[in-house]
Image: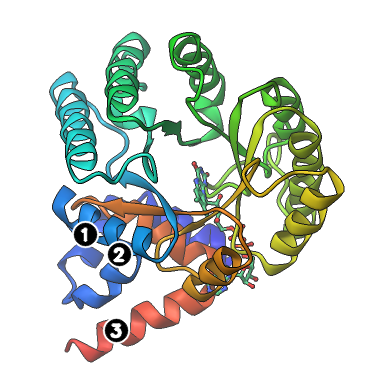
Amino acid sequence: MFRSLILAAAGSERVERLVEAAPLSRNVVRRFIAGDYAADALRVTRELVNQGLAVSIDHLGEDTTTPAQAEAIREEYLDLLSALAAAELTPQAEVSLKLSALGQAFDEKLAYEHARAICAKATEAGTTVTIDAEEHTTTDSTLEILARLRRDFPTTGAVVQSYLRRAEADCRDLAGAGSRVRLCKGAYKEPESVAYQSKLDVDKSYIRCLNILLAGDGYPMIATHDPRLIEIGENRSKWYDRNSDEFEFQMLYGVRPDEQLRLVALGYTVRVYVPYGTQWYQYMMRRLAERPANVAFFLRALRSTK
Ligand SMILES: Cc1cc2nc3c(=O)[nH]c(=O)nc-3n(C[C@H](O)[C@H](O)[C@H](O)COP(=O)(O)OP(=O)(O)OC[C@H]3O[C@@H](n4cnc5c(N)ncnc54)[C@H](O)[C@@H]3O)c2cc1C
């Protein structure tokens, strides 16, 4: 109920205008977002890499509606990859990409071509790209584009959302040799016809998917902050004889930083997803929907700016 309300607000332009106009302390947004510019993402990446963490940088923005916007996003990623290489932050830092930002909704071919250019640049820069998962209506198109990208750039990462009823089948398709697959619970509001609705069902699906990926020949990327699932991930990785360089944990910037460092100290690879850019509204609302405590933090900070 709480999650549905916040996710409904995430889609409302009226609420978006209200929240963006509120006297938001920069600290609230800065807890989850590196800053407005690529230079901010680079600064945060450098700090995280110095602590032994790996990074995936995401330029915020989704639901692009014009070819000009899609082209601007492509250019942003190409510049970001050049800057990462120049700062010698590759291969520890890669990029995450939303195909909706590249025009997938109105021209799949255009989105593919832009994603291809970004993958080519990432290869030149000595790093990788992971294609984020978005609403279920885009899953088939995203996986098709991913398969095409992987013909030339086999390290391109996929994302599976365990709340989708199709998740296990997708994991089986994606568990082949060399295949990088991020497993997350899923962050969007989805109907019961396609997605499990209860936390228990989503978690059980997550564990079934984890088993498929760990038993396979690919490179599983266990993206969660859930203590129980992290513990299961640690145990199952041993059960499946995975060395610490044969899978990784992933978490979001600003969420459970102590846990990120605890896992690094144990010798695991932990990659932090670092978003930057001015279009933070939808990303922030998804984070609030995940955790009531985040809403309290958000409201407290709003009050303290008045
Ligand atoms: C690296 C990464 C990439 C992602 N990419 C995608 C994507 O491409 N597509 C997509 O749909 N979703 C993506 N997500 C989001 C994901 O789907 C979930 O919405 C998000 O991770 C929350 O789920 P959770 O597994 O952390 O568990 P939740 O069920 O949200 O939380 C479980 C438990 O984790 C702990 N916890 C969670 N948050 C906190 C916190 N802030 N502080 C302390 N404890 C906390 C609490 O104990 C909580 O009970 C990504 C997540 C990560 C980490």
Residue 194 coordinates in the image, percent (x, y):
68, 34
- Counting residues from the N terminus, which is met first, the one under dot 3 or under dot 2? 2
Quadrant of the image occupied by residue 191:
top right
Question: Which is in the foreground here, disc 3 or disc 2?
Answer: 2
Identify which residue is drawn at 82% across, 42% down: 208
Q: Please tell me how crowded label 3 is: few (under 14), some (14-19), or many (20+) other residues with Cα within 10 Å.
A: some
SS for callout 1 = helix
Q: Regarding ligand 1, which quadrant of the image does it lie in? A: bottom right
- Is there CB contact under 8 Å for labels 1 and 2? yes
Q: Which mark is residue 301?
A: 3
Name the kind of residue labelled 1 in the image: Arg
Identify the image quadrant of the C terminus: bottom left
Name the kind of residue labelled 2 in the image: Glu
Residue behind mark 1 = 43
Identify which residue is drawn at 76% across, 25% down: 172
Q: Which mark is residue 146?
A: none
Name the kind of residue labelled 3 in the image: Ala
Residue behind mark 2 = 47
| For residue 239, side relative to residue 52 (left or right) | right
Question: Which is in the foreground here, disc 1 or disc 3?
Answer: 1
Mark 1 residue CB less than 8 A from any atom of ligand 1: no
Comparing 92 with 106, the one in front is 92
